[in-house]
Amino acid sequence: MPALGLGTWQVTGDGCRKAVSDALEIGYRHIDTAQAYENEAEVGEALAESDVAREDIFLVTKVWPSNLDPESLPRSVERSLEKLGVDYVDLLYIHWPAGGFEMNATMEALLAQQDEGRARRLGVSNFTPDLLEAAMERAPLFALQVEYHPFLSQHELIGMCRSHDLLFTSYSPLARGDVPADETLQAIGEAHGKTAAQVALRWQVQQDRVAAVPKASSAEHRRANFEIFDFELSEEEMSAIFDLARGERIIAPDALAPPAWG
Ligand SMILES: NC(=O)c1ccc[n+]([C@@H]2O[C@H](COP(=O)([O-])OP(=O)(O)OC[C@H]3O[C@@H](n4cnc5c(N)ncnc54)[C@H](OP(=O)(O)O)[C@@H]3O)[C@@H](O)[C@H]2O)c1
C-alpha cells in the first residue's frame, strides 16, 4: 500500500473525477473512498479514463454501518464494485463499528468478500484497541484506519499494528485544516523549505508502518502533499511534533463513535 493516498471525503461529482484523474497524473497510486462518500462512481470514471493500469492502483473502499449485517454486506460490496467499475478492491474496510455491526457475523461476512475475490485485503476503521483485538482474532487484517495527526496521539493503536503486522492509515492527517496554522510545524517546515502540512504528512509517513490519506480538492494541495519524499525530519524534529499531541479528536459522530471514546 503506497504510504500516501488521496482522501476523497466531501469531494463529489465531476470535481471528484477531476481530482482523482489529476492525482493519478501527479503519481498517487492509492485512492481512499467509501460507500458513504457517494463518489465511488466518479472515482471509477477517473480510473477508467486513466492510463495507469488497474493493478498499479491501490483502491480502497469502506462498508457503511447500515450494510454491516451479513445479508447487506455482500450486496453492498457488489454495488461498490459496479460503481467503481472494477472486479476487486485492494482493501475493504469496515467504516465504523456501528449500525448493523456485530463482531462475529460482520467479520465472517467481511472474510467471505476476501474469499470470493472481491477484496484483496481487509481492514477496520474507527476501532478501539479492544475491538481491534477481537477483530484480529476473527479475520486476517491488513490495515487499521483511524484519525491521526500531530494533535492526537495514537500511540497504543500504532503499537498494536506494529506488533501484529498491520499497516496503520491516518485519516484527517491534516486535522481538517488545523495543521497548516501550527507555528511549530511552520518553523520546522521553514528549515526544510516545506509547509506545515508537508511536515505533518512527512512526520506520519516517516513512522514505521504509517500511511496517510490527506484530502485535497485543490490541485495545488494535491501536488504539495505528494512532495514529501524528498526530505527527512531529524529525531529532534520528530519528537517536537510528537509533543504537539493534545487529545484533539475531530471526528466522533454520536451515532457512530465507539462508546469508549467518551
Ligand atoms: N475512516 C473514516 O471514518 C474517515 C473519516 C474522515 C476522513 N477519512 C478519510 O481521510 C481523508 C482525509 O481526511 P479529511 O478529509 O477529514 O481531512 P484532512 O485531509 O486532514 O484535511 C483536509 C483539509 O486540508 C486542506 N489541505 C489539504 N492539503 C493541504 C495543504 N497542503 N496545505 C493546506 N491545506 C491543505 C484541504 O483543502 P482543499 O480540499 O481545499 O484542498 C481540506 O480543507 C478523507 O478524505 C477520507 O478519505 C476517513
Image: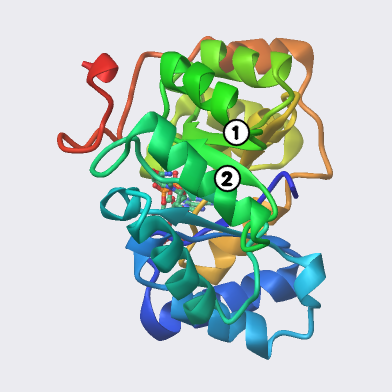
Name the residue: 40% across, 59% down: 9
> What type is the residue that disc 2 sits on?
Leu
Query: What x and y, as percent, mark residue 66?
Result: 26, 53
Identify the element where label 1 is drawn: loop
Characterize the local packing of mark 1: few (<14), some (14-19) or many (20 or more) Cα atoms within 10 angstroms: some
Query: What x and y, as percent, mark residue 116?
Result: 64, 60
Viewer-nearest residue: 34 or 73: 73
- 21 left or right of 73 in image: right
Residue under label 1, please give it: 139
Q: Relative to 23, is 130 above or below? A: above
The answer to whether mark 2 and mark 1 are in CB contact below 8 A is yes
Name the residue: 22% across, 20% down: 259
| Residue 111 image label | 2
Picture quadrant of residue 31: bottom right
> What type is the residue that disc 1 sits on?
Ala
Picture quadrant of residue 71: bottom left
Identify the element where label 2 is drawn: helix
Name the residue: 79% across, 78% down: 52
Query: What x and y, as percent, mark residue 90?
Result: 67, 57
- 175 left or right of 4 in image: left
| Residue 76 image label | none
Query: What x and y, as percent, mark residue 24?
Result: 70, 72
Looking at the image, can residue 103 be seen? yes
Q: Which callout, 2 or 1, points at the residue further toward the start of the chain?
A: 2
Q: Relative to 16, is 151 above or below? A: above
Q: Relative to 105, is 14 above or below? A: below
